[in-house]
């Protein structure tokens, strides 16, 4: 791509200078977590060295400054995903906590014995287990949309699953294994046609594409900062205001109350009703820097760069490694390549690649039902981000060829 200066971008990420077993680090585990640019690290250092104070509690200057930084971050997230108001932005510890919040509070209110919830076969455990915990208490039915051979959702089956007992649809925007980008606006429109609200797990979409929660008409949308060049331990739950207002709190404690007595507690307004305890205000201020970084670099430019790397790497893998099987081949998928080498175990492939400085993920990727559907125990997964280069793609393919020659 013409104006995309990947060398300049790499300079923002000091960790990329590291050597692993004397090889330059080739970091291809971006789906698990992306690396962090210096501006985000600087924000964290700045908070600890200049403005550390507990938020929403003090009249003193530091507390007010820390509160302003956190609330500015909330507004930044609102703009970033085009929510209607900052009250619709709930800060959590990550996608997992966001989804647990929705399942427990919204699901707990809405799903009764005999009701139905629709999930898909490609969900991360974070969008399966919270619902199962609730089902074990309530006894509703979980229906599952299967995937087709190319890794896309079977939309005909999806449409056929609705009954008058369907209460919620919860679905990944993009798969962390297959890279598939689901037709989320269509899924939501179809669900709304049946009067059913939709929870979207956006963990793998937000770092790689412009997400507009209003244009897709999502009811809830969850994502994690650490996968989008931000700090760890920070997540977001977007929720439609009228739904959030109707839901009971998720956790109890400080910050989320209006008044407390032993007889009765009343709860704070949105968004604080869902933010019990001291938040990670340092990380939340740093999320602001991460979004600024994404916007400055340009999410469309990043997506195009990643897509070029995906095409280039996939073509080389298919041409040069006959033993490879790649899972997920839908057009427009995220830059994630999950694969196995016939005759080799995924752990061995990953361990030997590491010896060459190449970081990939191996295993079930917290998607065991999907592994069952694919008929495998696990896969190797290489995934690209803004700072990866064509030279790294070559190092990966050449390294993998060496590994295959050793194992097969
Ligand atoms: C699709 C998807 N959903 C949910 C999660 C959970 O995210 P976190 O561990 O940040 O809560 C992940 C993490 O890999 C993911 O890829």
Image (cartoon, rainbow, N blue to C red):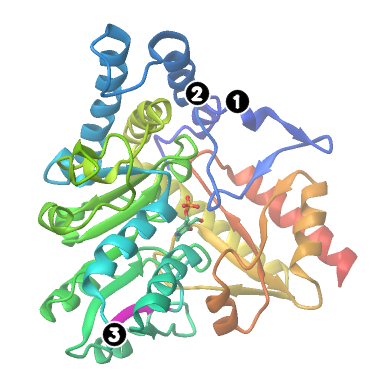
Image location of residue 260, percent across then percent down = 22, 38
Local secondary structure at mark 3: loop
Instruction: Specify start and end residues of the magenta stretch as a single range.
Output: 115-120
Q: Which residue is mark 1?
A: 14
Residue found at the very far front of the displayed protein: 263
Image location of residue 127, percent across then percent down = 42, 66
Q: Quadrant of residue 214?
A: bottom left
Q: Is ligand 1 within 8 Å of the beta carbon of the residue shown at mark 3?
A: no
393 in the magenta segment: no
Q: Is residue 172 above or below residue 394?
A: below
Q: Which residue is mark 3?
A: 113
User: Mark 1 Cα within 10 Å, few/some/many (few <14, many 20+)?
Assistant: few
Magenta stretch prevailing secondary structure: strand
Q: Which mark is residue 267?
A: none
Image location of residue 405, percent across then percent down = 86, 65
Q: CA distance from mark 2 to mark 3?
A: 48 Å
For residue 140, side relative to residue 309 (left or right): left
Q: Residue at x 56, y 42 (%)?
A: 388
Q: Earlier in the sequence, mark 1 or mark 3?
A: 1
Q: CA distance from mark 2 to mark 1?
A: 10 Å
Q: Nearer the viewer, mark 1 or mark 3?
A: 3
Image location of residue 398, percent across then percent down = 75, 55
Q: Residue at x 51, y 60 (%)?
A: 311
Image quadrant in which the C terminus is located: bottom right
Nearer the observer, 242 or 392: 242
Q: Quadrant of residue 375?
A: bottom right
Q: Which residue is mark 2?
A: 41
User: Mark 3 Cα within 10 Å, few/some/many (few <14, many 20+)?
Assistant: few
Callouts 2 and 1 close, C-beta under 8 Å: yes
């Amino acid at each position: 791509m013409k104006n995309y200066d990947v060398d300049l971008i790499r300079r923002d990420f000091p960790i990329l200078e590291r050597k692993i077993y004397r090889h330059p680090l080739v970091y291809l585990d971006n789906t698990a977590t992306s690396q962090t640019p210096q501006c985000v690290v600087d924000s964290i250092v700045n908070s600890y060295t200049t403005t550390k104070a507990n938020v929403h509690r003090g009249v003193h200057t530091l507390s007010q400054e820390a509160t302003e930084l956190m609330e500015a971050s909330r507004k930044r997230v609102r703009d970033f995903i085009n929510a209607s108001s900052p009250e619709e932005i709930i800060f959590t510890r990550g996608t997992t906590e966001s989804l647990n919040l929705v399942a427990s509070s919204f699901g707990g209110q809405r799903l009764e014995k005999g009701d139905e919830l629709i999930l898909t076969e490609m969900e991360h455990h974070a969008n399966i287990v919270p619902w199962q915990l609730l089902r074990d208490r309530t006894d509703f039915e979980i229906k599952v949309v299967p995937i087709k051979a190319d890794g896309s959702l079977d939309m005909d089956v999806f449409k056929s699953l609705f009954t008058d007992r369907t209460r919620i649809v919860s679905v990944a925007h993009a798969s962390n294994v297959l890279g598939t980008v689901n037709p989320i606006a269509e899924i939501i429109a179809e669900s709304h046609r049946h009067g059913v609200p939709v929870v979207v797990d956006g963990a793998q979409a937000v770092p790689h594409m412009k997400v507009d929660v209003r244009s897709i008409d999502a009811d809830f949308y969850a994502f994690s900062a650490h996968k989008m060049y931000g700090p760890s331990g920070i997540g977001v739950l977007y929720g439609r205001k009228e739904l959030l207002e109707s839901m009971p709190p998720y956790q109890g404690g400080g910050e989320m109350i209006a008044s407390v007595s032993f007889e009765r507690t009343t709860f704070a307004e949105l968004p604080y009703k869902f933010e019990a305890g001291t938040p990670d205000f340092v990380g939340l201020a740093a999320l602001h820097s991460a979004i600024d970084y994404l916007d400055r670099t340009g999410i469309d430019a990043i997506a195009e760069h990643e897509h070029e790397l995906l095409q280039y790497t996939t073509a080389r893998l298919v041409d040069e490694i006959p033993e490879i099987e790649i899972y997920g081949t839908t057009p427009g998928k995220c830059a994630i390549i999950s694969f196995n080498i016939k005759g080799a175990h995924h752990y061995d492939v990953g361990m030997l690649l590491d010896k060459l400085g190449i970081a990939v993920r191996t295993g079930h990727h917290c998607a065991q039902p999907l592994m069952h559907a694919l008929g495998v125990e696990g896969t190797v997964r290489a995934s690209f981000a803004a700072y990866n280069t064509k030279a790294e793609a070559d190092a990966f393919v050449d390294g993998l060829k060496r590994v295959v020659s050793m194992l097969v």
